[in-house]
Image (tube, rainbow, N blue to C red):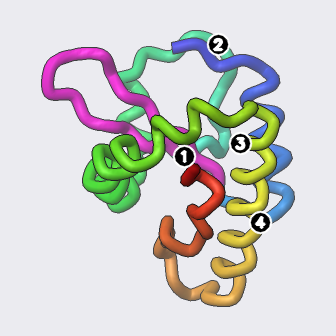
């Protein structure tokens, strides 16, 4: 996979804002699972997906693996009918809310996907 300078710069910016940044990759092969990867210190350029496993966040990977089919089935048809800028603005609000929740429970390391109001995604 290819990681550009803008990708890394954006992750670094979010880190400075107090977020712990990560991204997820789904390998295109039979029975593959999501790999959720820490971004801190990741280089730009071409990276083999298999080499990302050393940066994995196993607990978050399991959450994504368990929730992805449900989220995809529930929201994909609705989100595809919204303008991209509206979706991105909505996701920024979700991130800001999650950041506030995370700071309030600083000693917990849980990512609570349900903390975001999903009514925006429904018709």
Closer to the eye: label 4 or 2: 4
Disc 4 is placed on an element classified as helix
Mark 1 Cα shell of 10 Å, populated few (<14), some (14-19), many (≥20): some
The disc label shown at residue 38, or none:
1
Question: Based on the displayed image, in which of its 4 quarters is residue 43 positioned?
Answer: top right
Please give left or right for residue 96 compared with residue 79 in the image: right
Question: Based on the displayed image, in which of its 4 quarters is residue 5 positioned?
Answer: top right
Q: Is residue 28 above or below residue 38?
A: above
Residues tagged 4 and 2 counted as in contact (Cβ below 8 A): no
Disc 1 is placed on an element classified as strand
Place of residue 36 in the rendered image (x, y in percent of width and height, measured from the top left): 43, 43
Q: CA distance from mark 1 to mark 2?
A: 16 Å
Closer to the eye: label 4 or 3: 3
Q: Earlier in the sequence, mark 1 or mark 4?
A: 1
Q: CA distance from mark 1 to mark 4?
A: 19 Å
Q: How many numbered circles are shown? A: 4
Closer to the eye: label 3 or 1: 3
Magenta region includes residue 107: no
Residue, disc 4? 96
What span is in magenta?
21-37
Residue, disc 3? 87
Q: Earlier in the sequence, mark 4 or mark 2?
A: 2
Disc 3 is placed on an element classified as helix
The disc label shown at residue 45, or none:
2
Q: Residue at 66% across / 70% down in the picture? A: 98
Q: Earlier in the sequence, mark 1 or mark 2?
A: 1
């Amino acid at each position: 996979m290819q990681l550009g300078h803008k990708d890394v710069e954006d992750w670094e910016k979010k880190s400075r804002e107090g977020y712990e940044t990560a991204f997820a990759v789904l390998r295109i092969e039979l029975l593959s699972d999501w790999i959720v990867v820490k971004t801190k210190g990741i280089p730009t350029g071409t990276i083999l997906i298999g080499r990302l496993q050393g940066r994995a966040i196993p607990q978050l990977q399991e959450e994504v693996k368990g929730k992805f089919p449900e989220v995809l089935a529930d929201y994909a048809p609705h989100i595809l009918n919204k303008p991209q800028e509206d979706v991105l603005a909505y996701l920024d609000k979700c991130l800001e809310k999650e950041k506030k929740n995370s700071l309030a429970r600083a000693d917990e390391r849980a990512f609570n996907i349900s903390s975001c109001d999903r009514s925006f995604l429904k018709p």
